[in-house]
């Protein structure tokens, strides 16, 4: 399967949902990059009037490259539409996000949007969350060991994410570290894990997006689009 073609199909389909005057959440990642490019073309060619809140430094740079006007949640706390990718999606439209390390900001932006559209290629569909990808957990550096113990109690194998370009831990835009929690048999109780991590001091946030996505768009390499709604 041509995954790039599938990602492009999903991203461009999501961009068609954008209307004049909207305030947008602009996600992070390779699939969302296609959506931002398509939105940028409409801004440049058709005079589309929108403003976007980026979910990461990378998303901000990409939006500026495509001439998408930017705003902040301080100026516009209520968004009409947010578009972002996902690492896993199940049949209940629950997601795992965070392989790009931006899941905390992504969750803030997604929950401020009236409509949150997750865009994926078919490889991201799973029967059970956690079967293909680990769950990212953003932690205060001093809390790595206590949070690791909590994750082990939940049946996970925690692993500190390492930075790709240097020797050391991966650091988020907030200056936190990321624990990747591997669940050998998948996550049996996403709601329970969500509650446990939300209550754990030292955890800033995690990559479970439950009851957040209103839409999931699955793009296929041949251009076919599967659009699911909650």
Image (cartoon, helix red, strand yellow):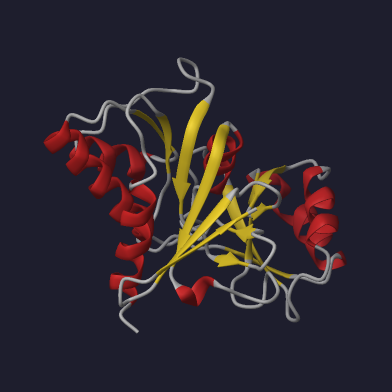
Task: Tell me which residue sits at (49%, 31%) in the image.
Answer: 80
Depth order, front residue of 75/177: 75
Give the mark count: 0
Give percent across and percent down for residue 166.
Answer: 38, 60
Task: Tell me which residue sits at (41%, 49%) in the image.
Answer: 28
Give percent across and percent down for residue 15.
Answer: 34, 47
Give percent across and percent down for residue 110.
Answer: 56, 40
Give percent across and percent down for residue 204.
Answer: 67, 41
Q: For the view shown, which residue lies furthest in the bottom direction?
A: 1
Above/below status of 124 relative to 147? below
Does residue 97 appear to the left or right of 225 in the view shown? right
Depth order, front residue of 115/72: 115
Q: For the view shown, which residue lies furthest in the left direction?
A: 45
Q: Which image quadrant: the N terminus?
A: bottom left
Does residue 32 appear to the left or right of 97 in the view shown? left
Q: Quadrant of residue 155?
A: bottom right
Does residue 35 appear to the left or right of 116 in the view shown? left
Task: Tell me which residue sits at (74%, 42%) in the image.
Answer: 202
Task: Tell me which residue sits at (60%, 48%) in the image.
Answer: 214
């Amino acid at each position: 399967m041509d995954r790039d073609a599938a990602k492009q199909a999903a991203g461009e389909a999501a961009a068609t949902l954008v209307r004049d005057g909207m305030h947008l959440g602009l996600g992070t990642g390779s699939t969302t990059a296609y959506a931002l490019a398509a939105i940028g073309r409409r801004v440049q060619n058709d005079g589309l009037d929108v403003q976007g809140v980026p979910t990461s430094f990378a998303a901000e740079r990409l939006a500026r490259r495509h001439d998408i006007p930017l705003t902040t949640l301080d100026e516009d706390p209520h968004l009409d539409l947010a578009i972002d990718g996902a690492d896993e999606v199940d049949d209940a439209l629950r997601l795992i996000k965070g392989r790009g390390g931006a899941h905390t900001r992504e969750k803030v932006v997604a929950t401020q949007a009236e409509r949150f559209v997750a865009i994926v290629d078919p490889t991201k569909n799973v029967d059970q969350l956690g079967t293909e990808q680990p769950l990212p957990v953003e932690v205060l550096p001093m809390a790595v060991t206590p949070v690791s113990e909590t994750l082990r109690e939940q049946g996970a194998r925690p692993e500190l994410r390492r930075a790709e370009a240097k020797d050391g831990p991966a650091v988020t835009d907030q200056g936190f570290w990321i624990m990747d929690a591997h669940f050998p048999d998948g996550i049996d109780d996403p709601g329970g894990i969500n509650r446990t991590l939300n209550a754990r001091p030292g955890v800033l946030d995690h990559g479970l997006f439950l009851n957040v996505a209103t839409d999931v768009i699955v793009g296929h390499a041949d251009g076919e689009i599967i659009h699911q709604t909650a």
